[in-house]
Image (tube, rainbow, N blue to C red):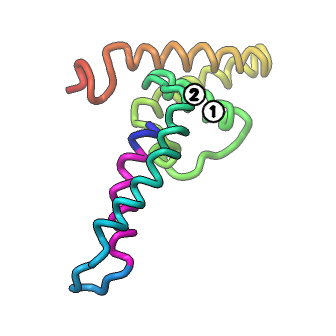
């Protein structure tokens, strides 16, 4: 995901850097050199940091996001915006609501620790089930 975000932002940043010295409607004389140096200087640092980050599967990303937001909501926090501003897909948000509902009932009956354990277990199971056959660009999602 980090690599995708970097890939999508690099051409925009490089293009903006290359055009910095030109006026609208006027060709830029240093575009090629500036763009090349910007992408060359950014690539090694980005490559080093990207390779240091472990790559998470869709199910792991879902699990981490659902766990985080479930704990926030169970603690009484109010999520800002909608599910997209929380970084969730529509289905991930459905999973979150199901997990939070179950965790609230468990917290009332058995306490916070049991609710936290339920959040961990259900988020992991439900997200794994959701991504079992691939994500939006894999498997039966096409």
The residue that mark 2 highlights is: 64
Residue drawn at the location 65% of the way across and 15% of the way down: 118
Residue drawn at the location 58% of the way across and 51% of the way down: 80
Crowding near the residue tagged with mark 2, few <14, some 14–19, many ≥20 C-alpha atoms within 10 Å: some
Q: Main secondary structure of the magenta part?
A: helix
Residue drawn at the location 38% of the way across and 19% of the way down: 131
Q: Position of residue 18 (x, y in %)?
A: 34, 70
Q: Is residue 9 magenta?
A: yes
Q: Is residue 120 left or right of residue 54?
A: right
| 52 in relation to 139, above or below | below
Badge count:
2
Q: Position of residue 135 (x, y in %)?
A: 33, 25
Q: Is residue 124 left or right of residue 118?
A: left
Secondary element at image label 2: helix
The residue that mark 1 highlights is: 68
> CB of mark 2 within 8 Å of CB of mark 1?
yes
Residue situated in front as seen by the camera: 104 or 15: 15
Residue situated in front as seen by the camera: 78 or 36: 36
Q: Position of residue 17 (x, y in %)?
A: 39, 69
Residue situated in front as seen by the camera: 57 or 88: 57
| 21 in relation to 75, above or below | below
Secondary element at image label 1: helix
Residue drawn at the location 43% of the way across and 39% of the way down: 3
Q: Is residue 72 left or right of residue 138?
A: right
Residue situated in front as seen by the camera: 47 or 36: 36
Q: Is residue 2 magenta?
A: no
User: Residue 12 has which mark?
Assistant: none
Quarter of the image containing the C terminus?
top left
Range of magenta residues: 5-20
Q: Position of residue 106 (x, y in %)?
A: 70, 17
Crowding near the residue tagged with mark 1, few <14, some 14–19, many ≥20 C-alpha atoms within 10 Å: some
């Amino acid at each position: 995901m980090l690599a995708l975000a970097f890939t999508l932002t690099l051409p925009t940043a490089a293009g903006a850097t290359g055009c910095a010295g030109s006026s609208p409607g006027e060709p830029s004389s240093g575009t090629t050199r500036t763009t090349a140096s910007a992408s060359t200087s950014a690539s090694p640092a980005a490559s080093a940091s990207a390779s240091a980050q472990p790559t998470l599967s869709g199910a792991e990303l879902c699990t981490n996001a659902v766990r985080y937001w479930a704990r926030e909501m169970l603690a009484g926090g109010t999520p800002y915006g909608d599910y997209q501003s929380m970084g969730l897909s529509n289905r991930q948000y459905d999973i979150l609501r199901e997990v939070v509902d179950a965790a609230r009932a468990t917290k009332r009956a058995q306490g916070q620790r049991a609710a936290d354990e339920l959040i961990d277990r259900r988020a992991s199971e439900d997200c794994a089930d959701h991504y079992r056959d691939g994500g939006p660009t894999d498997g039966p999602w096409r």
